[in-house]
Amino acid sequence: MACVYLLELKFMKSNLLLKSAIGLTFAVSLFSCDSVPTSTAAVAASVDTTKNPEAVADQPTPEPAAVTLDTVLYNQQMTHMVNGDSSGKWPVKTAYPLPGAILPFKRIIAYYGNLYSTRMGILGELPPKQMIDRLKVEIKNWEAADPATPVQPALHYICVTAQGSPGAAGKYRLRMPFKQIDSVLNIAKMIDAIVFLDIQVGLGSLQEEIPELEKYLAMPNVHLGIDPEFSMKGGQAPGKVIGSFDAADINYATDYLAKLVKKYNLPPKVLVVHRFTRPMVKNYQQIITRPETQIVMHMDGWGAPARKIGTYKHFIYTEPIEFTGFKIFYKNDLKETPSRLLTAEELMKLKPRPLYIQYQ
């Protein structure tokens, strides 16, 4: 029986060895049995356009074959991520990422929360210096568990929070003041971290909320998170039922981000989508991947280790989009018996290995 459970509502170059005596030796090509992707255009042309009709729409005419360092590293890291899985589901064939992409070249280790609340996550629970010191410990743990994948620190800030009452706008959501986002950006500088702005829309929509954050999303170090749990399409108050996003919602978000990448000449944007049940993300086959964006489907459930791993296998692994994430709850994961926190070494055994790890 599939594991389904509720979250508690809280208001408020790794070294790359190139063999060059005669040419480059490749252990594996992710896109062809006997050839390696040779350029952005060539890789894009190999995409399964039945699933993703827009993936090659803007790609230039294929260039002469020229294997690049990024292509080799990309193939190595994608193979490393797949972790021996032979199902054919992973890795997902998507458009080759634009220059400056974080994934799959690095693993993002993020601290999550809200500065107004000590209950919504570690980001708001501890003073900045203490919080950063603790994040550094987790980074070292991951560097030890997976030396092949460098770590990118991150702060994941809930800038629009679901509420139990309708508020002035009647949307059951509260927008944080920009000065709080500015504070998170300043804290992030302490550890050269990127920042995620997370949205819980309540009875609102991504179309209403994302444009409000454009001045921040236009920054190269700011990315986006969206939470289907608190997208109440049936009109209920948040927390009464688990909400959902459709593929159309996710496609809107990536399209908006892609346009910003093009407009401001930015590196690709990462979009984190929280998920711990199948109905939270509807029509996943219709989700469009783009070279300007990188979608992380993030296992956001809490509980005992077996429950969490089961959720990952049932709802993340079986519906592949692009990359995966996994959340560790410092407190909620200890509420069930047997209670303990999963380690980096244990998460490295998952198929595929998650490239976004969030601590709350």
Image (cartoon, helix red, strand yellow):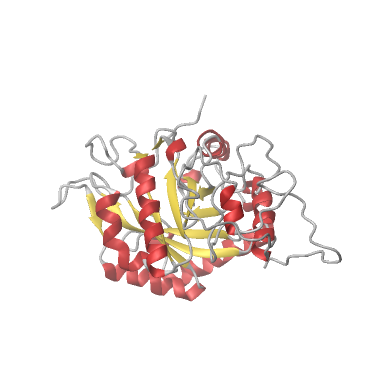
Residue placed most toward the observer, 162 or 210: 210
Quadrant of the rendered image containing residue 178? bottom left
x, y percent for residue 219: 39, 69
* Farthest residue, direction right: 21
x, y percent for residue 312: 54, 39
Residue visible at 43% across and 70% down? 128
Residue placed most toward the observer, 354 or 143: 354
* Farthest residue, direction top: 1
Q: Is residue 285 above or below residue 31?
A: above
Image quadrant for the C terminus?
bottom left
x, y percent for residue 222: 41, 65
Count numbered badges in the picture.
0
Q: Is residue 6 above or below residue 41?
A: above
Q: Is residue 186 above or below residue 99?
A: below
Asked if residue 88 shows in the view, the reply is: yes
x, y percent for residue 208: 24, 53
Residue visible at 25% across and 58% down? 175
Asked if residue 329 shows in the view, the reply is: no
Q: Is residue 317 above or below residue 269?
A: above
Residue placed most toward the observer, 35 or 8: 35
Residue 256 is left or right of residue 318, and the answer is: left
Residue visible at 15% across and 47% down? 170
